[in-house]
């Protein structure tokens, strides 16, 4: 049983071409999945931010109505957000670590799609 070099080279080239196509298909599937997950999260974040802004304005107006001057209500809500920003700034290092771990877990899940039709 002799191996013909000319046929072997052709088979190797076909194998490499098929392997490249498989890698490209898997990469495309993974990228589509990651993009879908990212777009859903972006939509959730944008809708949440819009809701927070509208609720903050309404709460500020309500507090202002109770106090008697609408601008005081808005200032109180702004002060609460400033206090929250200071608290987040003070605890930023532990938050960065927790968020980093969470993002790593999300990316790890996103790179392993469950449904190949996504």
Image: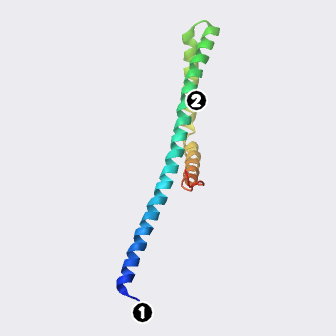
Residue farthest left in this picture: 6
Dot 2 crowding, Cα within 10 Å, few <14, some 14–19, many 20+ = few
User: Which residue is painted at 47% across and 58% down in the image?
Assistant: 27
Element class at badge 2: helix
Q: Is residue 13 left or right of residue 46?
A: left
Residue 10 visible, this angle: yes
User: Which residue is painted at 38% across and 88% down in the image?
Assistant: 4
Q: Position of residue 28 (x, y in %)?
A: 46, 55
Element class at badge 1: loop
Residue at image mark 1:
2
Dot 1 crowding, Cα within 10 Å, few <14, some 14–19, many 20+ = few
Q: Position of residue 62 (x, y in %)?
A: 62, 13
Residue farthest bottom in this picture: 1
Tag shown at residue 84:
2
Q: Position of residue 48 (x, y in %)?
A: 57, 31
The relative height of residue 37 versus residue 90 in the rendered view (above or below) is below
User: Which residue is painted at 54% across and 29% down in the image?
Assistant: 49
The relative height of residue 62 versus residue 44 in the rendered view (above or below) is above
Q: Is residue 6 left or right of residue 109?
A: left
């Amino acid at each position: 049983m002799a191996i013909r070099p000319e046929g072997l080279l052709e088979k190797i080239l076909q194998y490499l071409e098929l392997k490249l196509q498989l890698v490209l298909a898997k990469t495309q599937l993974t990228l589509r999945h990651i993009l879908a997950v990212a777009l859903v999260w972006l939509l959730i974040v944008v809708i949440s931010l819009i809701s927070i802004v509208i609720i903050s304005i309404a709460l500020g107006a309500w507090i202002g109505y109770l106090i008697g001057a609408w601008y005081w209500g808005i200032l109180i809500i702004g002060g609460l957000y400033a206090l929250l920003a200071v608290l987040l700034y003070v605890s930023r290092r532990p938050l960065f670590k927790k968020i980093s771990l969470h993002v790593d877990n999300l990316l790890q899940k996103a790179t392993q799609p469950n449904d190949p039709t996504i």
